[in-house]
Amino acid sequence: MSIGSDLTAARERADMTIEQLSAATRIRTGLLIAMEADDFSRCGGNFYARGHIRSIARVVKADPAPLIAAFDAEHAVEDEKARREERAAAKGPTLRPARPRWAIVVGAILVILMGWGMVRLFTLPSDIEANASKTAVTTATVTTPTPKAPVTPTVRPTQKPTTAKPPVLMTALTLTAKNDGTYLTVRDKKNRRLFQGRLSPGIAQSVTSSGDIRVTVGNPGNLIVTLNGKRVPTKLYKFTAHPNGTLSKTAGSS
C-alpha cells in the first residue's frame, strides 16, 4: 500500500471524514485529499509534508514513524538527484587540448599531388606537340551500330497485407457536483493527472481517456457520475471507471 492509502485507512479507522480531520489538524480539505491520493507536491516541500503527516497521525491515533520512514524512502532518490545536479552545476567545463586531425592533413597532401600532376600533363613543350603532329597517320574511322539492349519488363513489388490494429477502448467520464460540491482528483491508466480541484454545485467536469480512469472523491454523496453516457451511482471515495461502462473500487484503497 502507498502512504496515501495508509493515511486514508487510518482516518477511516478513526471514523472521521475529511472535513472533521481538516478541522482537527487545521490542514485544508483539498490538501488532505491530495495527500491521500499520494500527491505531496502541494505541501510546499518535504519538510512541511513530514509535519502534516505527523499532525494527521496524532489526530487519528496512528504511529507516525512508519509513515515518515516510507515518505523518506520514496523521496530520498529525488533529494539525492537534486544534490547531484547542484554539484554538477558547480563544476566548470573541462577543456581538453585539441588533437590534430590526421585524415584532413593526408587529404590535403593528396590534393596537392594530384594538382601538380594535372599541371604537368597540360603543360607539355611545344616542340613535342609539333613532332607528334608531323608523324600523325590518318586513319579511317569505322562506326559500328550499337546494339539495343532488350527491354526488361518492370516487376512491381508485391505489397504485403497490412495487419489491422485492434481498436482502442475509450472511457468517457462526466463528474457533476451537487449539494455543497466536492474535491476531485482524476488520473488516467498511466497515473497522469487529468483534473484536480474542487467542483462547485452544478459544475460538471468531463474527461475522456483510453483505458481506465481513476477518481478520488472528497465527498461521494455530493457527486453524480456519468460513464459512457449512462449514470452510475457510487458511494466509493476511490473508484476506477472502465471502458465497458462499469465502476470498481480502486485496488489498494481501504
Image: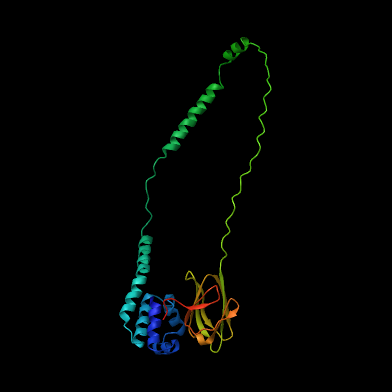
Color style of the picture? rainbow
Residue 48 lies in quadrant: bottom left
Q: In which quarter of the image is the C terminus?
A: bottom left
180 w.r.t. 210: above or below:
below
99 w.r.t. 163: above or below:
above
Question: In screen coordinates, is 132 left or right of 6?
Answer: right
Query: Camera-side residue: 84 or 208?
Result: 208
The image position of residue 112, as x and y in percent, is: 49, 30
Question: In screen coordinates, is 17 left or right of 207?
Answer: left
Residue 199 lies in quadrant: bottom right
Report the residue at 36% width, 81% height from top: 53
Query: Camera-side residue: 161 or 189?
Result: 161
Report the residue at 43% width, 90% height from top: 20
Query: Camera-side residue: 181 or 79?
Result: 181
147 w.r.t. 141: above or below:
below
The image position of residue 57, as x and y in percent, is: 35, 84
Q: In which quarter of the image is the N terminus?
A: bottom left
Q: How many labels does the image show?
A: 0
The image position of residue 184, as x and y in percent, is: 50, 80
Outermost residue, top side:
135
Query: Camera-side residue: 57 or 107?
Result: 57
